[in-house]
Image: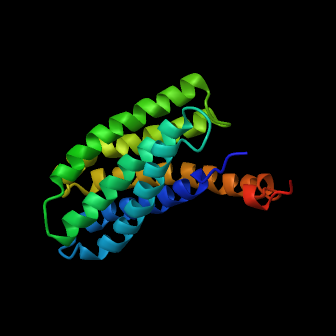
Amino acid sequence: MFINYITLMLINMVAGLFLLAYFVYQGLGETNQKRWIPGFGMTGAIALTTGLHMIFTWPVPGSFNIAYGEMSVLFGILFIGASLALAQDWDLLTVAIYGFFAGIAAVVVGVRIINLELTRQPLLSGIGFILTGLSGICAAPALYLRTNRTLRLVGAAVLIAAALIWALTGYMAYWGHLADYSKWVPSPMKSP
């Protein structure tokens, strides 16, 4: 049996997407944006660490390592980049440009998950990737048009929709994983 920590990655993404939705809705217009640094940094650290581990070790079957591992690396580095930019009072434009290309990758992954029916709920997972990716694609325009309150509200709504999909997926996975792994024993503890 393989060890699956995608649940941690999903709930971390939920927290990050909710933080980002709140930032898009309110934080883009604030003069003191440093209060967002810890949340973005924590989200980025967990996403980058788990994503890198997944892409280097392939702990889960098949292409799930690509879909969840590589997208987690991109998600994590975006959040770390945003936290560093906010800490140093740098412009977020380069982070948003990076988010555009990461967003395209997430949309491609989402469409392909639906096409190949890769998860237990491929339509839901695919839509989650697509909505998350669209938020990355729209990051630069949202940054440029930050004074447009309606656009920021729509962006926040898309982020919240994606977060809710990942929350449902992640919390249900926790429910199932606790049962599935309840009798799992590490190799050194197994009886010969």
Q: Residue furthest top?
A: 115
Q: Residue furthest left?
A: 90
> How many numbered markers are drawn?
0
Visible in this render: residue 153? no
Horizontal and vertical percent for residue 172? Answer: 69, 53
Q: Nearer the viewer, residue 110 or 41?
A: 41
Q: Residue furthest right?
A: 191
Q: Is residue 83 left or right of residue 1?
A: left
Visible in this render: residue 129? yes
Q: Which residue lies at the image location 22% right of the left edge and 54% below the top edge? A: 148
Horizontal and vertical percent for residue 126? Answer: 53, 35
Q: Nearer the viewer, residue 152 or 126?
A: 126
Q: Which residue lies at the image location 54% right of the left edge and 41% below the top edge? A: 58
Q: Is residue 35 left or right of residue 46?
A: left
Q: Which residue lies at the image location 17% right of the left edge and 74% below the top edge? A: 31
Horizontal and vertical percent for residue 91? Answer: 13, 59
